[in-house]
Amino acid sequence: MDENQPQKSGTNSWLIGILSVLPIVLMVNFLIKLFTGILPDMIRLNESGQEVSASDILHLFGPFFTIAILWGLLHMILLVWFIVHLMQDKTTTSNDRLVWLLLLIFLNPFSFPFYWYFR
């Protein structure tokens, strides 16, 4: 192994690989919950003719916010981790580093699994 490349342990590498796919899974789960859970319930509450209380709205959006917060935290942690890893990798040329940095910033979280696999 090259001495300039950051060290990866086997378990740590697989854990990061799994975590790199997790933001996409959480985003899909987030959208499924939105379209199958929250929107039909909001339509049902609106059509019932009753006044909607704040607790009803909070009950609908509680799981939605939980998934969104978890997704956001995981996303930011992985983004910082991948950028730090990229900048510490001495084997990467400046052109490659620039391309990966732009991909990580503008196409995240879709670029996370690709970066994990190729780097």
Image (cartoon, grey):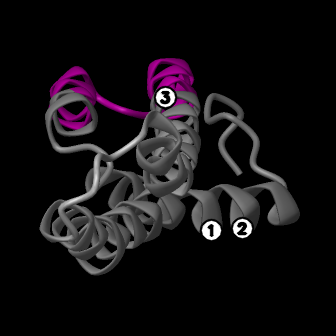
Residue 85 located within the stretch drawn in magenta: yes
**Above or below, comparing residue 26 to residue 107 in the picture:** below
The kind of secondary structure element at disc 1 is: helix
Tags 1 and 2 touching, CB below 8 Å: yes
- Counting from the top left corner in percent of width and height, residue 85 is at 55, 29
Residue underneath mark 1: 18
Residue visible at 55% across and 20% down?
Answer: 88
Where disc 3 sits, the SS reads helix
What's under tag 3, amino acid-wise? Met
Specify few, some or many for label 1: CA neighbours under 10 Å numbering under 14, 14-19, or 20 or more: few
What number is the disc on residue 14? 2
- Residue 76: mark in rendering: 3
Give the mark nearer the N terminus: 3 vs 1.
Answer: 1
How far apart, in angstroms, are the residues tagged by discs 3 and 2? 19 Å
Q: Quadrant of residue 97?
A: top left
- Report whether 99 appears left or right of 66: left
Of helix, strand and loop, which mostly describes the magenta segment?
helix
Which of discs 1 and 2 lies nearer the camera? The answer is 1
Taking 57 as reference, is 3 above or below it? above
- Residue range in magenta is 80-101
> In the image, what residue occupies the spot 71% across and 51% down?
1
Quarter where residue 107 is shown: top left
Of the two numbered discs 3 and 1 in the rendering, the one whose residue sits closer to the viewer: 3
